[in-house]
Amino acid sequence: MCAAAVEEGWDAALAQRLADVAVRRWRSFERRTRPNKRTPQARLQDLIQGLRQASPVDEIYLEPGDFERLAPRFAGLLAELP
């Protein structure tokens, strides 16, 4: 996942941090979300929100849509995890 983030232009250290957050957020989604609200789109939006909250970089210094481009790449990789 770090390689995917680095390909998107993220710093390697920050990419590692975001990957760790993404894994925790992805695995806890079922526990944190009501059963009738569990959709793939809701899971992706939750991942985007988690990445935003965990990022030490202020959003005003990022390109618009950075997290929106990174989250689907992470989601594709996370969906393959056991």
Image (cartoon, rainbow, N blue to C red):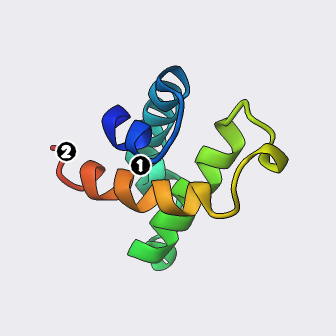
Q: Which quadrant of the structure image shows residue 82?
A: top left
Mark 2 neighbour class, 10 Å CA radius: few under 14, some 14 to 19, many 20 or more: few
Q: Quadrant of residue 5?
A: top left
Residue at mark 1: 26
Tell me residue 2's x, y (percent).
36, 33
Q: Residues at badges 1 and 2 in contact (C-beta under 8 Å)? A: yes
Q: Nearer the viewer, residue 64 or 74?
A: 64
What residue sits 84% from the left and 49% below the top? Answer: 60
Q: Amino acid at mark 1?
A: Trp
> Which numbered dot is residue 81?
2
In the displayed structure, 50 sits above or below 34; it is: above
Task: Give the x, y percent position of residue 68.
Answer: 55, 63
| Rendering coords of residue 25 (x, y %) | 49, 44
Q: Secondary structure at mark 2?
A: loop
Question: Could you tell me which residue is drawn at 47 percent across and 54 percent down?
Answer: 70
The image position of residue 45, as x and y in percent, is 56, 66
Residue nearer the viewer, 47 or 62: 62
Q: Quadrant of residue 57?
A: top right
Can you say which quadrant of the picture contains the N terminus?
A: top left
